Image (cartoon, rainbow, N blue to C red):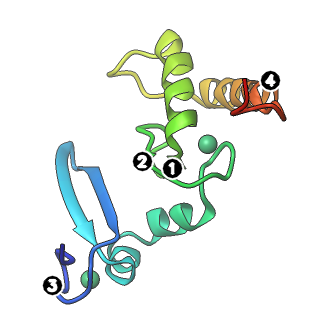
Amino acid sequence: MLCDRCQERNATVFLTRIVSGQMEKGQWCEACYAAIDPAHADAMAKGCRFCGGPLLCSLPFPSSDFVCARCKEEAYRFADVLISVDQKPTTELLAALDEHMKKWLSDNASPTDGLS
Ligand SMILES: [Zn+2]
Ligand SMILES: [Zn+2]
């Protein structure tokens, strides 16, 4: 699959973004993605916001943060309790979420992970 922007290189970034309230699906090569959305490209390069693992998708809050599949599930589970869809997350909520994820990660980072 070719990049939407340059139509030359292979697309390696596949995302659904919210642009002015509209869902926009796209695929880009890394160079083009960095050009159209430097803040996101930068966040992506850093890895999952919570565990630093490989990225899967963006969280709707705070808008420029990316998380891996595992953290996303937990963050949504936690945030669902605290926010409704049309409510903007507060700094308190984000701090609570960070705190929760930190604890959750350390509780779940067992060395026997994957073994039974
Ligand atoms: Zn491109
Ligand atoms: Zn993670």
Quadrant where the C terminus sits is top right
> Going from the N terminus, do you reach mark 4 or mark 1 first?
1
Task: Kindly identify the amino acid type of the residue bearing the numbered disc 3.
Answer: Gln
Task: Kindly identify the amino acid type of the residue bearing the numbered disc 1.
Answer: Phe
Q: Which residue is mark 3?
A: 7
Q: Which residue is mark 1?
A: 66
Q: Secondary structure at mark 4?
A: helix
Q: Nearer the viewer, residue 77 or 91?
A: 77
Q: Which residue is mark 4?
A: 107
Q: Nearer the viewer, mark 4 or mark 2?
A: 4
- State the separation of the CA atoms marked 3 and 4: 45 Å
Q: Are marks 3 and 2 in contact (CB under 8 Å)?
A: no
Q: Nearer the viewer, residue 54 or 44?
A: 54
Task: Kindly identify the amino acid type of the residue bearing the numbered disc 2.
Answer: Cys
Q: Position of residue 69 (x, y in %)?
A: 49, 39
Q: Position of residue 59 (x, y in %)?
A: 45, 40
